[in-house]
Amino acid sequence: MSAPTPPFPGQFEPAADAAWDGWHHYAGTDPFEDAIGPFFVRRDEQGIVTGFRPGPLNCNSHGTIHGGCMMTFADFSLFMIAGSGGQEVNGVTVAFTCEFVGPAKPGQLLLARGELVKAGRSLVFARGLITADGKPATAFSGTIMRAPAPPSH
């Protein structure tokens, strides 16, 4: 079997975990995301979709997934959705909003989909929704300021 096609040109590697067969992991250097995730991405017939299955270490004191974890996954998803135009977007998040509209629990499959609102020369606008086992969990939107790709570490 051949490796799946990346969702768009960029720093991607096929997911090593068999549970994520057909998905890709962002292979760029982002130690914080790597510590929270792993997060995955693919393109299907509906467009870009990101995925994450949080565990007990991603929880808050109420036993649900911590808001900071949800925001980190949403920020990852923001950049992947921004790339849905066919090109990896390098930059930094300069504005970000989210609404926690429902709980997410450890072990649930979190998926995010969204839309690229506008990709300008210096700013990119996108928005999306994270679902937990198909139920809305977090709505988000953000603005990315383009920047040169960081040097490899």
Image (spheres, rainbow, N blue to C red):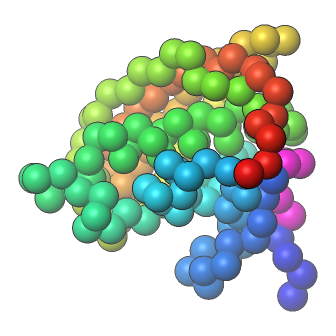
Is 100 placed above or below 117 here? below
Q: Is residue 58 left or right of residue 134?
A: left
Q: Residue at x 43, y 65 (%)?
A: 53
Q: Is residue 96 left or right of residue 102?
A: right
Q: Residue at x 67, y 79 (%)?
A: 16
Direction bottom: furthest residue: 1
Residue 9 in view here: yes
Residue 118 in view here: no
Q: Is residue 87 left or right of residue 109?
A: right
Depth check, front residue: 113 or 27: 27
Task: Where is residue 48? Give x, y as percent.
Answer: 69, 47
Quarter of the figure with residue 20 = bottom right
Task: Where is residue 45? Give x, y as percent.
Answer: 74, 54
110 in the magenta segment = no
Is 24 placed above or below 125 here? below
Quarter of the figure with residue 41 = bottom right
Residues drawn in magenta: 5-10
Direction left: furthest residue: 62
Q: Residue at x 71, y 27 (%)?
A: 91
Task: Where is residue 62? Give x, y as percent.
Answer: 10, 53
Task: Where is residue 23? Give x, y as percent.
Answer: 69, 67
